[in-house]
Amino acid sequence: MKRLALILALIAAPAFAVEPDEVLDDPALEARAREISAGLRCPVCRNESIDESNAGVSRDLRLYVRERLLAGDSDTEVVRAVVDRYGEYVLLKPDTSGANLILWLAAPALLVLAGGVAFISIRRRASGPEDRLSEEEEARLRDLLDR
Amino acid sequence: MLIELGHFALILAFVTAIVQMVVPLIGAQKNWRGWMAVAEPAATAQFLLTGFAFAALTAAFVTSDFSVALVVANSHSLKPMLYKVSGVWGNHEGSLLLWLLILAGFGACAAWFGGDLPEKLRARVLAVQASIGVAFYAFLLFTSNPFLRVAVPPFDGQDLNPLLQDPGLAFHPPFLYLGYVGLSMSFSFAVAALIEGRVDAAWARWVRPWTLAAWLFLTIGIALGSWWAYYELGWGGFWFWDPVENASFMPWLFAAALLHSAIVTEKREALKSWTVLLAILAFSFSLLGTFIVRSGVLTSVHAFANDPERGVFILAILAVFTGGALTLYAARAHAMQAKGVFGLVSRESALVANNVLLAVSALVVFVGTVWPLVAEMAFGRVLSVGPPFFDAAFTPFFVALALLLPLGTLMAWKRSQGGRLMRQLMPALALAAALLLLGYALGSGRSAFGPLGLALGGWVLGGAMVDLWARAGRGAVAARLGRMRRLPRADWGRALAHGGLGVTIIGISGLLAWQREDIRVAEIGDSWTLGRYEITLQAVRETEGPNYLTTMAEMSVQANGREVATLYPEKRFYPVAGMPTTEAGIDGGLWRDVYLVIGDPQDGGGWAVRSHLKPMAAWIWLGGILMALGGVVSLTDRRMRVAAGARRAPAPVAAE
């Protein structure tokens, strides 16, 4: 119970994420830093990005990201540097490597499949086999009319 | 004593539910009227007994009876009365009891107002409803008894999680549960229909009001939760794609799909088996949501009350009901022959597209929510799926849905003409174009998404207005307006709900594209500008609330030298729970919110202060309110009341 309370206190103290002293002077660089931080997960929190979290490690990571940016790294280089340290766990948007393709393609695949099935079955029904009579019925109809 | 009586009533309700599950089902199978007739009084009794149990627990919370373990763990004598009451469902055991109370309530409603249902269908529906109850009564009584006493009552309680001590969140769970559990009615109808082997227009007509009610409660519940996150968590975010949020969002998407496919089943006798499948899926995802929340299997911000062992029990319930229903479906679905024939460009097709897109959107949410679990177990990869994924993967489908929506509402049944449709929708297109230009004129400079989002919202909102206008027939403007007033309420409900979606889209686009933020250290008396506002930190005081300590800042907001508002953002600390919370100071408005947060005192003097300008924020929840209102207005339509089985009107059993 005490541990739970501690965890809750950690995650529920949202008062401050980005501290004033972290903010970079160059607004363009700062905007990039924010963008990158929003995509990196705080390694010790529940489902928070380092941009939202006020855990110590998140602050360290935010500072690290800004340090790399000041050193002239590109956005992807910064992200790769963080992933190299902490593993893909910190990526809030998983890459498309290996099994992750399932994650990315499941929905589009279902859309194509369901859309295809719906299209074909509506087309078939619209062309109306139910409206028309089968050959046997036609024959029977002729038979009845001729009589 | 009252507690023991409550416990006893709960056990009796359990037994009653078992009777209600078994006897009417056998009666319906053997055609024994007496056995079928058991369902109705049993449903009433079960509801009253569960209601008594719930009242007993509530009484314990209200009187702060610290001999009850649950009250000790979740209440405190100093807590305001509202939160003493909401504390009843602010925990695992109590929330499940509320879940059961609502389940029994829906069952009782079906018994009371379902007089027009065919006898057998009603008996089977009530039996299936009771079987869900049996599973959850067992779960509650055997693993999570809320009525346990403590041997030595402590002097005071441990307090409710302070984050939950908030008016927005006090009523968030009941609405969400009304939605989750409301879908159990659709599920019971679906399973009963499968047992019966018959789905017709009349069946769809009975299912629709229940689904609509569930959907509208879910809408309110989700909107309340999102509003709470906005002002309470202190980030000014309104949706985090948190597993628990997703757990409520998936049933919402499925309920929306079911709502639309049931219309096709009722009006055109088509899509029958798909409608039944959706009804099963919608409730299954409600159960999945319960599982996710209660087991804590997917760790998230919301993990207030979870326990892995209980998770296994719920997983078993989920497996039995979903697996059982789907097996029944596989065995019986072929018995449901579709009758209606329709063309490729028709309202039926548009509703099929709506269903496909909603189901695919729900799948995105589902896959994203469980993927970390699957990837770890199956592929040994520890990874995260967060908001950036959902933003990228979910949005395209929902945009497609919004693009199609106005077209679908104006299409005719069976066969429609594209050309006429576009002519009718010119005003909506004009509104969208105007908003697009306005968006570019405002110039976010950041991305094209803002203006495009505004245009999309305008398209949906305009489409809803055109829908009403087109339904008013032809002729002079005055005559049309007069006829518009007399349109059936269902038409108004549809337009309101669709318009609400447009309003929400506008709100989200505006907020995300044009929000501004300022982070700084401010000394008392410092001023800074944010957009066209000038904000001044006037004072910071330490005071005390009923059960918390607070650091309260006084900040004034001025525009062009005129006072706009004085806001009091707070940093609270709840000593009993040992937790801090943020209370943002918000000046709300139709066009923008000024959102201020006070942080920690700095070493070099001054306070960390964050100020946000959140344009159009109110529109997000305004849209939610409109959607829910649309649901309410539709429910009051005479056709729906007839369907739900109000006493006055004779039942139209035959299809249209």
Image (tube, coloured by chain):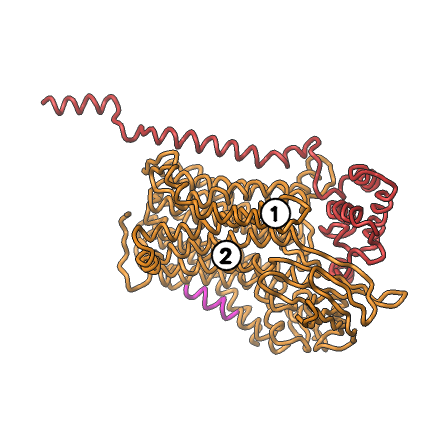
Chain colours: A red, B orange
Residue B463 lies, with reference to residue B305, above or below; the image says above
Residue at 56% from the left image edge and 59% from the top image edge: B621
* Membership of B51 in magenta stretch: yes
Q: Secondary structure at mark 1?
A: helix
- Toward the left, the furthest residue is A147
| Horizontal relation, residue B36 to residue B566: left or right | left
Q: Quadrant of residue B167?
A: bottom right
Residue B652 lies, with reference to residue B424, above or below; the image says below
Is residue B146 visible to us here? no
* Dot 2 crowding, Cα within 10 Å, few <14, some 14–19, many 20+: many
Q: Which circle marks residue B440 in the picture? A: 1
Of the residues shown, which amino acid type is indicated by label 2? Val
- Circles 1 and 2: CB atoms closer than 8 Å: no
Q: Using the image as rendered, state which of residue B375 and residue B56 is in the foreground.
A: B375
Residue at 25% from the left image edge and 21% from the top image edge: A135
Q: Using the image as rendered, state which of residue A47 and residue B577 is in the foreground.
A: A47
Residue at 65% from the left image edge and 68% from the top image edge: B165
* Dot 1 crowding, Cα within 10 Å, few <14, some 14–19, many 20+: some
Of the residues shown, which amino acid type is indicated by label 1? Tyr
| Chain letter for the residue marked with disc 1 in the picture | B
Q: Which circle marks residue B181 in the picture? A: 2
Q: Which residues are magenta?
A: B44-53
Query: Whole-percent x and y of residue B449?
Result: 62, 45
Query: Whole-percent x and y of residue A82?
Result: 82, 41
| Chain letter for the residue marked with disc 2 in the picture | B
Residue B378 lies, with reference to residue B76, above or below; the image says above
Query: Whole-percent x and y of residue B619?
Result: 56, 58
Q: Secondary structure at mark 2?
A: helix
Main SS of residues in magenta: helix
The label nearer to you, 1 versus 2, is: 1
Q: Quadrant of residue B158?
A: bottom right
